[in-house]
Image (spheres, helix red, strand yellow):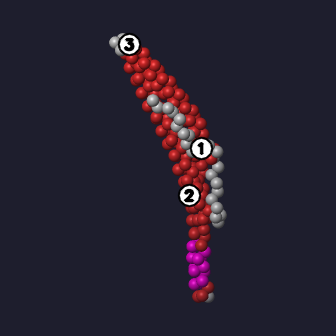
Amino acid sequence: MKKLLLIIPIGFLVCTSVFGQQQHVNTDSLSLIAQISANQLKLAKLENTVDQVTREKQDATTTAQMSANSSSAAASNLTNAPADKKLSQDASDQAGDARSDAKKQRRKSAKLDKLNKDINELKATISDEQTKLNVYTGINTPAPVMSQATTQPFAQVDTTRHL
């Protein structure tokens, strides 16, 4: 009888520790799954904005190039009549517009570069989290991150001609 009273509490402690560890593993894996889902949602949102930001960058590049051409034309008109105040003011205005448009284009380009960088970092984070999750699920290969950006080049070459 004394042995039975001693075995029951020990058995209870062993079962509690085994089930407690099992629940801890499930909590960790569930939190990883939740984090992966949240990051995949962020990734989808970022990838959905890539086309719009790319179009904005291309529009800004076109505008900057047209402003630079206008500025160049105004400057060449000024060289024909350097004493003309109206042409001088026009050339100054065109140069200011060209500087402003070039600055906007650089900002749009930086925004697109940052977006691509954020997408790549998020993909790496998701991959790391999936690798951690594989410890709990017993799968040895990471699940691929399916995305729209895998079919698109990482960064487009800047073909803007600067004068």
Between residue 20 and residue 73, name the one nearer to us.
73
Image mark for residue 153: 1
- Residue 31, given in percent of the width and then of the height, sits at 57, 57
Q: Earlier in the sequence, mark 2 or mark 3?
A: 3
- Which residue is painted at 62% across and 47% down in the image? 150
CA distance for labels 2 and 1: 22 Å
Per the image, label 3 sits on a secondary structure element best described as loop
Q: Nearer the viewer, mark 2 or mark 3?
A: 3
Residue that carries the numbered disc 2 in the rendered image: 128
Span colored in magenta: 5-17
Examine the structure image and report whether residue 15 is included in the region drawn in magenta. yes
Q: Quadrant of the C terminus?
A: top left
Q: In the figure, is residue 60 to the left or right of 149?
A: left
What is the three-letter code of the residue carrying label 2? Asp
- Residue 68, given in percent of the width and then of the height, sits at 46, 25
Examine the structure image and report whether residue 42 is included in the region drawn in magenta. no
Q: Furthest residue to the front? A: 80
Image mark for residue 6: none
Q: Furthest residue to the left? A: 83
CA distance for labels 3 and 1: 48 Å
Q: In the figure, is residue 162 to the left or right of 86?
A: right
Image mark for residue 81: 3
Per the image, label 1 sits on a secondary structure element best described as loop
Count of all numbered marks drawn on residues in the image: 3
Dots 2, 1 in contact, CB < 8 A: no
- Which residue is painted at 48% across and 23% down in the image? 69
Q: Is residue 99 above or below residue 124?
A: above
Q: Residues within 10 Å of mark 3 (few under 14, many from 20)?
A: few
